[in-house]
Every structure is written in structure tokens, then in C-alpha cells.
Image (tube, rainbow, N blue to C red):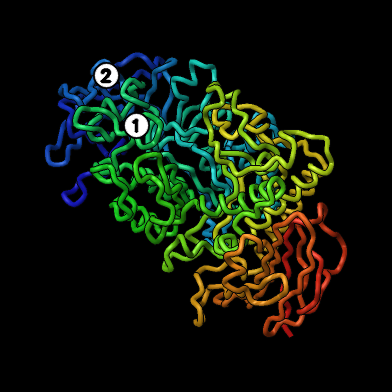
């Protein structure tokens, strides 16, 4: 410990005098270290008291028994009081434990872990943010059903790192895999009573240990050190292939649930410090999960920073997506503050430089919706983008069919495609926006086009859970159908949504399985299903293979055309390096008027995006968007310096053309655009 950093080195560290354990608690009156026999996880063979440093509230003890492989817990005593929850009969986990093991159905033990690992010189890919394409996936679900992976590795960290998994991701063209929670977690008590499981993992038990059940059986049998080695090995192999690893992290609440939930660690060590409470001891729950971590406590914010630095540096992960990130920015009065020390510290800490930080910018508390209100250095899930894309391509189409109401036209759609400058500050630019149409939470891409309402009865909550605001459209029949007309309309809608996503400014995120039209049978909250409902199928129909090829093609178009990937917002009348100059046209090829922007009747849009080179060659693209279910003939715009437009993609085609030269048309030409479709052209110069 140093005077400058009294909270340094919490958890277990090896010293010349044996292992040293350091634990923070400001309200405890006593803490004991319980050491367990190697053969019997329930036999405490030694107990040692921790000594308190009054200035820092850090308790410490040394013991040569705190060596790799040793299981240990804490016994904590303290005063009664409405905000306290001390119980000396409980064996508690070290909040900084690198390994965790079960010792019975409800019992857990911390484990001292040998963290040695040879990276063999493999380093992080450091993919620039403007080249990043995120693939949101579940460790188990990605490989569990893949017949090309050895059975004993399916659904594991090693299965994700298998050549087959890596080859799939590389051939698709994504650059980063974003994993649903891999911090050690447990299922909620309610789910356990129902015989269900928390498949997604948003119920953290410890912030420093990988979830052991995602490791291979051999690693699980060997213990936490082997689990950690398998995790690091996964990261290493993904990095060797040029793929980044982003972790979905849940620092907003813990698995201890409400006051009547299980006490495994934080509540028993310092309930008053770790959790947001009223003076009467009632939990201030802004997460909807029973409790909320109190980041206005400096030691708690420090724990989160230490966890991030451990995973980013020791384990070499490339970024983090923060679940319910608004909770982390709430002050002592429980209000969100975008200048909160933790929110700013995460993106300013030198030990986290170049690590991608992505916020889910909301929670369920008062003032919880904060999209666009995180500081520079953060990217954010852009729910406004998601809703606008769904509305234009699905809900508006439904409205036009049923009552002739054309919706909102193209103005707001164009703003989202161009990087949502009305949401994110000029200094942050379009890369502050993580664009997505779907995520793990909600309908899949295929289900958006096949269901008007959620079908969540299997979740055990009488269909009450999950969002009712899906902006989906079943195109005439709820669920599966044999109607070829409806199937074609659904597949075209999927291509339109995927195409718009991958051709928009910002950082695109694809949900695993959307690239081939995976369905969850209308369940938009499948968090409690660890089954073939949520695992990726590798037995795919012809149309699914074609959708996969379309996604692959779109990702290649994004890589090859820097005009689709601006780093900065353009400024009218100025040349801004790294931006894309956007020129907007109507169906007649004329510049868009204010009336065109705001008219609900106008659902056809053309725009030319021209890059302003910094590191890549000059590039221009033309995109034509038509949001009506009847064909139209448009006049391609005459744009300075453009001599021809080369057609790169047309969403009206189920199958990509193969072996043909790309068709070229001259500016001012009239071209046919199919019903409810979009086209992408490369603009050629003289």
C-alpha cells in the first residue's frame, strides 16, 4: 500500500512472504480468512484474522497457504443497522478472486489462481474503430451445434477458438466478436425454482473470474487455473486471426439480487458501501434486477476499473460493452452525471488506452435514457438508429398496406444513415454510434419480419416479459408460412435491414445468426433458454445460405468503400478530413428540398457519399433507397466528376449475381428500382 494509492493491490498477490490478501470494507468490525483443505472444500483447516488500515479501510493478511490452487473465503462481522447485512455464519467470496468453484449447491469458494500464460508474442489486432464490425455472440451458442467441431469442445471457449469457428467469422468478414457475459455468474433464484437457467449470463457472481461452465470438461476438472488458460488461449487464437474480443460486462448489479437474495460476497462484506440504498436500507434498484452497484463509493468504482484493467491487460481483451451503463454514472443522489468520475475515468485511464468502450446508454431508473449523453471516448448502442430502421422498412410498410398512412418519409432515416449527428456531439463524430437493428435482447432479424407480437410463454411469465414495442411486421401471417409471396417479402425486408445497417455511418453490430436468418420462434426475451432455440444451427436452407452470402458481400463492400466509414462529421462548406460529404437527391435526381425531407409522402431517397481522404484513396458511392411496395423509375443524379455509376448490390435480388461484369450506367440515366428495395453503386471518375 502507498499513501498515493491506498486501494492498490486488492485481492491476492504473491510476495516473498507468501500470499497477501487485501479486502476493502469501511463498515466491518472484523474479517477472518478461512483456508480450506485441498481435498475437502468444506474443511476449514486454518483461520487467520485480517488487520485493518484505518486510513484506507483496507484489511490485509499474509499466509504462505495463499498459494495457487488454495480455496479460501472470508468471514465478516460488523454492526447492526438498516444499511448493513453482516452475518458471521456466512463464507463470503473475495470480490477480487480470479477463480471460483462450487462447494455444494449454494456454496462457493474463492481460489488462488496461477495466472502464468505464454502469449508467444501475439498482440492485439487494434482494429481502427471505423473498420470495426461487431458480431454479438454467445460463447456456448456459437459452436454448440457445429458438427465440424469436436464434440468435447462444442459450446466452450476452446470451441469458439477452433479453426472452424474462426474460419467462419473470418469468411463472413466481421472484425470483432462481442461475447455475452463471461464473468462468473449464476441463475436467479426464481429461475432455479422454475427449472430454468440464466443462459445470457447477466447475473454476475464475480468480476475477475471467467465463467467456468464455458470451459471444456477437461479444464473444468483441472480447476480455475486451467479455465483461465483456456480463456486466454481463446483470446490468443482469435488475435492471431486478426479478430478482436469484446466482453459484455455487467457492473451495474450482482447476483445477490434484493435484500432477501443470496449473500455470497458484496452484501456481507459492506452492504452500505457496495449497494445503492435509502437511509432506511431499502435498495434503490435502477436496474430491475434487485440491486444496483453504488459507483459513488470510490472503492466500488475502483473495483470496476481494476476489473477492466485486469481483463484488458492480463487477459488481453480488446473492448467492453457495458450493460445498463447509465447506472455506472449515477451520483450519490442516484442521478446520472455524464462527468461522473467512473464514466470519465474509464476512457481516460492510461492503462485502458486504445480499449474500445461501448455503453448501453440507459437503465430503468429515473432519467435512465441517456443515448448521446456519454463523454468523448465512448461509443453507444444507438436505439434511435434501431427504431428508425425498423420503422421505415417494417412498421411503415405495414401502415401503408393497412391504411395508406406513409409514415415519416426519408428525412429522419437519412440522418441516422449519415451517423446520427442530431444525437451525438460534433466532437464525438459518427463512430460514437454503434448501429444495430437487433441484439440478443429482442426479436432476431428473421422474427422481426415474421411476427407482429412476442411469443414468450415458454419463459414462465405468462408472456408478460419482453418488449411490446418491437416495430416488427409479419407481412400478413403470424409465424411460419407456406406462402411464397410472404416469404419473399420477408427475405427482402431482411436484406433491406441488413443492407442499411452495413452501409450506414457508425460502427455496425450484427447479432449472431442474423446473417442467415435465425429464428427464435417469436421469443423476444430468450434469456432463460439454454437449448436449440438459442444455439446457432449449422443446418441451413438454400435461402439462408444466400442471405449469408449477401451479408458477406455487404461487409466486403463496406471494407472496400471508405465513403461508407466516415470518422468525423462533415461541416457544410468546409473540407473535414476523415468525413464523408453527403449530397442528397430525390427520385428525379434533383437536390432534396426541405419539403422533400419533411414530406411523409416521399419515401424515395438518393445520396452520394464522397470520402475526404486521410489514409485511404478517394472514394464515392451512390445509394438509392425506395420504401414503397411498388416499383419506381429514378433518375441517377449528375454529380461533379462522376462519369458512371457501377452497380454493386441490389436488395431486390435473392441471389447475388456471379461471374458477370458489374453493370455501369451514366449519370442522368433512368433506372428501374424494385418495390421496397435499395441499390448501392460505386461512382466512377474520369
Q: Residue furthest front?
A: 403
> According to the image, label 2 marks what residue?
46
Q: Is residue 189 left or right of residue 599?
A: left
Give how far across and how far down residue 657 sits, in percent. 84, 59
Q: Is residue 552 left or right of residue 177?
A: right
Q: Is residue 604 left or right of residue 462?
A: right
Q: Nearer the viewer, residue 4 or 189?
A: 189
- Screen quadrant of the N terminus: top left
Establish if 168 lies above or below 539: below
Q: Nearer the viewer, residue 542 or 132?
A: 542
Q: Residue furthest left?
A: 54
Q: Which mark is residue 585?
A: none
Residue 307: which quarter of the image?
top left
- Screen quadrant of the C terminus: bottom right
> According to the image, label 1 marks what residue?
291
Cα–Cα gap, marks 1 and 2: 34 Å
Q: Secondary structure at mark 2?
A: strand
Give how far across and how far down residue 484 sits, in percent. 84, 41
Amino acid at each position: 500500500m502507498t499513501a498515493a494509492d491506498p486501494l492498490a493491490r486488492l485481492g491476492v498477490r504473491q510476495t516473498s512472504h507468501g500470499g497477501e490478501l487485501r479486502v476493502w470494507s469501511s463498515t466491518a468490525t472484523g474479517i477472518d480468512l478461512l483456508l480450506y483443505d485441498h481435498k475437502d472444500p468444506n474443511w476449514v483447516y486454518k483461520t487467520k484474522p485480517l488487520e485493518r488500515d484505518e486510513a484506507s479501510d483496507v484489511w490485509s493478511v499474509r499466509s504462505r497457504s495463499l498459494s495457487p490452487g488454495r480455496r479460501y473465503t472470508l468471514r465478516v462481522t460488523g454492526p447492526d443497522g438498516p444499511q448493513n447485512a453482516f452475518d458471521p455464519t456466512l463464507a463470503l467470496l473475495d470480490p477480487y478472486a480470479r477463480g471460483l468453484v462450487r462447494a455444494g449447491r449454494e456454496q462457493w469458494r474463492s481460489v488462488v489462481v496461477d495466472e502464468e500464460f505464454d502469449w508467444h508474442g501475439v498482440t492485439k489486432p487494434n482494429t481502427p474503430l471505423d473498420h470495426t464490425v461487431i458480431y454479438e455472440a454467445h460463447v456456448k451458442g456459437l459452436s454448440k451445434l457445429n458438427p465440424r467441431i469436436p464434440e468435447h469442445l462444442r459450446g466452450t471457449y476452446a470451441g469458439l477458438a477452433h479453426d472452424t469457428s474462426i474460419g467462419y467469422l473470418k469468411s463472413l468478414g466481421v472484425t470483432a466478436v462481442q461475447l455475452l457475459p463471461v464473468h462468473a455468474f449464476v441463475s436467479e433464484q426464481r429461475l432455479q425454482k422454475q427449472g430454468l437457467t440464466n443462459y445470457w449470463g447477466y447475473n454476475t457472481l464475480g468480476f475477475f473470474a471467467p465463467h467456468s461452465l464455458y470451459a471444456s470438461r477437461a479444464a473444468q476438472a483441472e480447476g480455475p487455473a486451467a479455465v483461465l488458460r483456456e480463456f486466454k488461449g481463446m483470446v490468443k487464437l482469435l488475435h492471431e486471426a486478426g479478430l478482436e474480443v469484446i466482453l459484455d460486462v455487467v457492473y451495474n448489479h450482482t447476483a445477490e439480487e434484493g435484500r432477501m437474495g443470496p449473500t455470497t460476497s458484496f452484501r456481507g462484506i459492506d452492504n452500505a458501501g457496495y449497494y445503492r440504498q435509502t437511509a432506511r436500507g431499502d435498495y434503490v434498484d435502477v436496474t430491475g434486477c434487485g440491486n444496483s452497484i453504488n459507483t459513488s463509493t470510490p472503492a466500488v468504482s475502483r473495483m470496476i476499473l481494476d476489473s477492466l484493467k485486469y481483463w484488458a491487460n492480463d487477459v488481453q481483451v480488446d473492448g467492453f460493452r457495458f450493460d445498463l451503463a447509465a447506472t455506472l454514472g449515477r451520483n450519490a443522489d442516484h442521478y446520472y452525471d455524464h462527468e461522473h468520475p467512473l464514466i470519465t475515468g474509464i476512457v481516460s485511464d492510461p492503462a485502458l488506452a486504445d480499449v474500445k468502450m461501448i455503453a448501453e446508454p440507459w437503465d430503468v431508473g429515473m432519467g435512465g435514457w441517456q443515448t448521446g449523453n456519454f463523454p468523448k471516448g465512448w461509443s453507444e448502442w444507438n436505439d434511435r438508429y434501431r427504431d428508425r430502421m425498423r420503422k421505415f422498412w417494417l412498421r411503415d410498410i405495414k401502415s401503408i398496406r393497412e391504411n395508406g398512412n406513409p409514415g415519416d418519409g426519408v428525412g429522419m432515416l437519412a440522418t441516422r444513415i449519415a451517423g446520427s449527428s442530431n444525437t451525438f456531439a460534433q466532437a464525438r463524430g459518427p463512430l460514437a454510434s454503434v448501429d444495430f437493428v437487433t441484439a440478443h435482447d429482442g426479436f432476431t432479424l428473421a422474427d422481426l419480419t415474421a411476427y407482429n407480437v412476442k411469443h414468450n410463454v415458454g419463459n414462465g411469465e405468462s408472456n408478460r416479459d419482453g418488449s411490446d414495442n418491437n416495430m416488427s411486421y409479419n407481412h400478413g401471417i403470424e409465424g411460419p408460412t407456406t406462402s411464397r409471396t410472404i416469404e419473399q417479402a420477408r427475405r427482402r425486408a431482411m436484406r433491406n435491414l441488413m443492407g442499411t445497417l452495413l452501409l450506414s455511418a457508425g460502427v455496425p453490430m450484427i447479432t449472431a445468426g442474423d446473417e442467415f436468418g435465425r429464428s427464435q420462434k417469436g421469443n423476444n426475451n430468450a434469456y432463460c433458454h439454454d437449448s436449440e432455440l438459442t444455439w446457432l444451427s449449422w443446418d441451413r436452407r438454400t435461402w439462408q445460405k444466400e442471405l449469408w452470402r449477401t451479408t458477406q458481400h455487404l461487409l466486403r463492400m463496406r471494407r472496400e468503400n471508405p465513403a461508407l466509414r466516415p470518422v468525423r462529421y462533415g461541416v457544410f462548406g468546409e473540407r473535414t478530413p476523415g468525413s464523408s460529404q453527403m449530397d442528397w437527391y430525390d427520385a428525379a435526381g434533383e437536390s432534396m428540398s426541405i419539403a422533400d425531407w419533411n414530406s411523409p409522402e416521399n419515401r424515395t431517397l438518393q445520396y452520394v457519399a464522397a470520402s475526404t481522404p486521410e489514409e485511404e484513396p478517394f472514394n464515392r458511392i451512390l445509394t438509392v433507397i425506395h420504401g414503397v411496395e411498388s416499383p419506381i423509375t429514378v433518375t441517377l443524379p449528375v454529380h461533379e466528376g462522376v462519369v458512371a455509376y457501377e452497380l454493386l448490390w441490389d436488395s431486390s435480388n435473392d441471389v447475388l449475381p456471379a461471374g458477370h461484369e458489374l453493370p455501369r450506367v451514366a449519370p442522368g440515366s433512368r433506372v428501374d428500382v424494385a418495390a421496397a428495395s435499395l441499390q448501392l453503386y460505386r461512382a466512377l471518375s474520369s
